[in-house]
Amino acid sequence: MLRAARSYDTVLSRLERIETKIRKFDKIADENDALWQMLDEQKEIDQIFLNSTEDYNKEIAEILLRTTKVQGDA
């Protein structure tokens, strides 16, 4: 009977350690998914800013050309 109780305690303690490791791995997996999602979103944002920068520069050039006044005879 004593041997069975010790064996049962050993199994329970191992099970607790395994469950703790599984929780840690689940946390790591969730963080990994979140990081990949963030990287994907960052790529999308970078692409938007690259396209926006060109449009922004064109718009500034047009504004400068429209508001520039000629000084004297050129």
Image (spheres, helix red, strand yellow):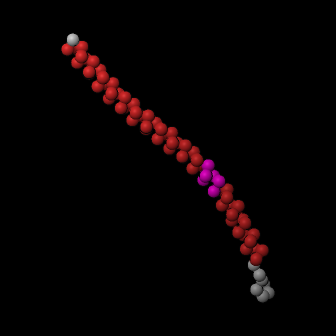
**Relative to the observer, which residue lies in front, 54 or 73?**
54
Residue at 39%, 30% (x, y): give it: 22
Magenta residues (range): 44-49
Q: Quadrant of the C terminus?
A: bottom right
- In this picture, is 50 found above or below 7? below
**Residue that lies at the very extreme toward the left in this rendered image:** 2
- In this picture, is 27 found above or below 51? above
**Residue that lies at the very extreme toward the top in this rendered image:** 1
- Return the x and y of residue 32 as percentages of the image width and height: 48, 40
- Return the x and y of residue 20 as percentages of the image width and height: 35, 32
- In this picture, is 19 found above or below 38? above
- Return the x and y of residue 72 as percentages of the image width and height: 78, 88
Residue at 27%, 18% (x, y): give it: 8
Was residue 45 drawn as part of the magenta stretch in this picture?
yes
Rendered image quadrant of residue 49: bottom right
Residue 45 appears left or right of 58: left
Residue at 74%, 71% (x, y): give it: 63
**Relative to the observer, which residue lies in front, 18 or 3?**
3
Rendered image quadrant of residue 9: top left
Was residue 21 drawn as part of the magenta stretch in this picture?
no
**Relative to the observer, which residue lies in front, 16 or 1?**
1
Q: Quadrant of the N terminus?
A: top left
Which secondary structure class fits the magenta region best? helix
- Return the x and y of residue 3 as percentages of the image width and height: 21, 14
- In this picture, is 55 found above or below 14? below
Residue at 72%, 69% (x, y): give it: 61
State the count of labels.
Answer: 0
**Residue that lies at the very extreme toward the right in this rendered image:** 73
